[in-house]
Image: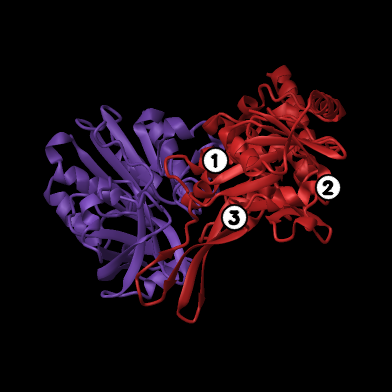
């Protein structure tokens, strides 16, 4: 857990492995890291949905979701898109280098409440990162949940994260529905935006929970379509992101209305967010 | 609780007598009054309306190092102040003391912020009652008063040639004990003069706001056009937040010189675009309209929703120092009118 006496002090982690999920200017790179001080594991525990500040000394730190499930023991994973100062500096790092992790922070998906239900995940682009631990948590507790449907889209074939895992989902009887935004050769799945793929799959709201994460505009239309499919606000969950500095509800900037995304979130039900106009600003 | 007095000309002796404490007091530096550690008691002044810079900087400095490190070595040298260090804030106004108690709720929320909290735990607050509130003071509207004792360990009243000192807590009594050679017992005349001064000061306050219903109603005015009436002339300078005793937002930055680095935090302001802009360039508060709205909503709705207290002490600084005369009370009054109109049309 976070250093209680000083929550601003990070842990040092060593990168065990690092690879690119997607190519391009805004490449996504996954880092598999382990604590340099092995004793941190004695007190560390995180739940799917929780985040951590990942940083590089001399540059700074930014908030990322922990994209590995707790069942993936002995390491943490972060999938990071190259975007700003900190993420560019992190992308320079390779296996063997060190970075810093401060966390876990924030709330998590209420997976225990969801036991016995059908789960639908709806992801877009890097938005699949916080959904991956949900999917893997359910996969490792398969008997506790009913159907699992993974709906995931990206701009192009190459822009999907975690491509190597899609095959595993299907083998286990988890339906995996993929999309790309525009037609490409050798693509046998759906072509179009994620909200349209959702309508194509048309999951039933019966005894179901839908979890969505992606670009704000996608989340907006996915929620609209989920409501069309009959999902009540209480059945829809999403994660929000804002600029963050402290991660512990002090520095002020990540508020949407009276809620701090870093502490009250990042996981919210739509029942909570629908009355907060700033949530989708 | 006990009553004392000292001759105002003995102020330097009083300050010099507080040898057990690190003493901070209102000091004139150029045109600015701010709380500095007392180096020369002669520079300390009790003749000011309120300090230009609020004493929040004593708990939450403008810039402070969180920890130091050396690149390539993964060790951190945290620079957390000790709660054992006895600090005395001499001459703090009741409103600024109240501001500590407000910000403290956030800084103790689940995670203690050790930098703020340790300084606060080691601090004794010897307040100075206001005899002449400023034109924009409205502390009674937000739970304070020119002579409010609520958040102080002791309070002083400047009675001209004499200063009346009343201790309120054990920490206040400890201060009186340390000053036993300088203080004399106060008589009825000082007590009565202090009471009269407090009553007079209260009657001199010209501005007020009835806050009832504001925290609940503000979120419903999210899209109301009245915000632009104020934000259109905002320059985005941030002075309303930097000099606000309850504004507590900060940025965190790494700084390196060769291999020696530090992670530091510094005051930040929700009035700047950079405050909330995402790495992608998307900004959830892209213009001054959204930023002005957030400043007011945060103080008068979000903070009370979360921490049961309005994050404003009515010190008037944001009104006094705004270069384009944006007035928080005008905004709040407008919000109340706007609600009435909306309710009528509903």
Residue B42 is tagged as none
Crowd band around label 3 with a 10 angstrom C-alpha radius: few (<14), some (14–19), many (20+) = many
Spot occupied by residue A170 in the image (x, y as percentages of width and height):
16, 50
Spot occupied by residue B191 in the image (x, y as percentages of width and height):
78, 26
Q: Which of the two discs, 1 and 2, labels the residue nearer the N terminus?
A: 2
The chain in purple: A
For the residue pair A37 and B239, the one nearer the viewer reads as A37
* Kind of element beneath mark 1: helix
The CA distance from mark 2 to mark 3 is 47 Å
Q: Residue at x 21, y 41 (%)?
A: A148
The CA distance from mark 3 to mark 1 is 22 Å
User: Is residue B137 positioned above or below B71 on the image?
Assistant: above
Direction from residue B222 to residue A209 in the image, left or right: left
Read off the residue under disc 3. Answer: B275
Q: Which of the two discs, 3 and 1, labels the residue nearer the N terminus?
A: 1
Chain containing the residue with disc 2: B
Q: Which of the two discs, 2 and 3, labels the residue nearer the N terminus?
A: 2
* Kind of element beneath mark 3: helix
The chain in red: B
Q: Residue at x 54, y 40 (%)?
A: B104
Residue B104 is tagged as 1
Read off the residue under disc 2. Answer: B9
Q: Residue at x 55, y 49 (%)?
A: B86
For the residue pair B70 and A103, the one nearer the viewer reads as B70
Crowd band around label 1 with a 10 angstrom C-alpha radius: few (<14), some (14–19), many (20+) = some
Instruction: For residue B258, say whether it is visible.
Output: yes
């Amino acid at each position: 857990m976070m250093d209680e006496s000083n929550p601003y002090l990070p842990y040092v982690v060593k990168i065990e492995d690092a690879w690119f999920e997607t190519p391009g200017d805004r490449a996504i790179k996954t880092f598999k890291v382990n604590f340099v001080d092995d004793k941190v594991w004695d007190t560390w525990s995180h739940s799917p949905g929780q985040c951590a500040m990942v940083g590089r000394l001399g540059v700074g730190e930014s908030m990322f979701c922990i994209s590995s499930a707790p069942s993936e023991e002995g390491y943490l994973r972060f999938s990071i898109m190259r975007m700003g100062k900190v993420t560019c500096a992190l992308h320079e790092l390779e296996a063997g280098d060190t970075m810093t992790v401060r966390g876990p922070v924030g709330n998590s998906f209420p997976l225990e409440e969801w036991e016995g239900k059908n789960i639908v995940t709806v992801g877009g682009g890097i938005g699949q990162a916080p959904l991956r631990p949900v999917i893997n948590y359910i996969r490792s507790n398969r008997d506790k949940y009913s159907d699992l449907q993974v709906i995931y889209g990206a701009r192009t074939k190459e822009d999907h994260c975690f491509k190597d895992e899609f095959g595993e989902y299907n083998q286990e009887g988890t339906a995996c529905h993929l999309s790309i935004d525009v037609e490409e050769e050798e693509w046998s799945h759906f072509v179009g935006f994620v909200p349209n793929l959702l309508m194509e799959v048309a999951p039933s709201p019966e005894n179901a929970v839908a979890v969505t994460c992606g670009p704000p505009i996608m989340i907006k239309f996915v929620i609209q379509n989920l409501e069309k499919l009959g999902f009540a606000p209480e059945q829809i969950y999403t994660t929000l992101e804002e600029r963050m500095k402290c991660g512990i509800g002090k520095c002020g900037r990540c508020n949407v209305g009276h809620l701090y995304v870093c502490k009250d979130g990042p996981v919210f039900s739509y029942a909570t967010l629908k009355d907060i106009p700033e949530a989708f600003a | 609780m006990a009553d004392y007095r000292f001759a105002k000309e003995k102020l330097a002796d009083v300050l010099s007598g507080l040898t057990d404490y690190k003493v901070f007091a209102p000091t004139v530096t150029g045109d600015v009054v701010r709380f500095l550690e007392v180096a020369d008691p002669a520079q300390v002044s009790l003749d000011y309306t309120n300090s230009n810079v609020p004493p929040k900087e004593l708990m939450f400095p403008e810039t402070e190092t969180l920890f130091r490190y050396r690149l390539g070595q993964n060790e951190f040298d945290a620079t957390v102040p000790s709660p054992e260090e006895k600090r005395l804030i001499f001459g703090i106004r009741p409103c600024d003391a109240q501001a500590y108690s407000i910000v403290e709720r956030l800084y103790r929320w689940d995670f203690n912020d050790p930098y703020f909290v340790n300084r606060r735990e080691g601090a004794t607050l010897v307040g100075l009652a206001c005899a002449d509130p400023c034109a924009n003071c409205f502390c009674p509207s937000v739970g304070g008063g020119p002579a409010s004792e609520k958040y102080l360990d002791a309070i002083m009243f400047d009675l001209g040639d004499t200063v009346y000192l009343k201790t309120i807590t054990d920490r206040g009594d400890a201060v009186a004990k340390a000053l036993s050679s300088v203080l004399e017992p106060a008589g009825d005349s000082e007590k009565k003069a202090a009471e009269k001064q407090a009553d007079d000061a209260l009657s001199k306050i010209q501005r007020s706001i009835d806050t009832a219903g504001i925290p609940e109603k503000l979120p419903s005015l999210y899209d109301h056009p009245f915000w632009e009436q104020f934000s259109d002339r905002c320059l985005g300078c941030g002075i309303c937040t930097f000099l606000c005793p309850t504004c507590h937002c900060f940025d965190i930055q790494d700084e390196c010189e060769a291999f020696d680095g530090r992670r530091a935090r510094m005051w930040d302001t929700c009035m700047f675009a950079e405050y909330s802009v995402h790495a992608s360039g998307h900004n959830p508060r892209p213009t001054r309209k959204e930023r002005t709205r957030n400043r007011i909503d945060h103080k008068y709705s979000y903070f009370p929703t979360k921490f049961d207290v309005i994050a404003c002490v009515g010190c008037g600084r944001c009104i006094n120092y705004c270069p384009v005369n944006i007035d928080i009370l005008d905004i709040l009054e407008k919000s109340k009118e706007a609600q009435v109109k909306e309710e009528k049309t509903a």
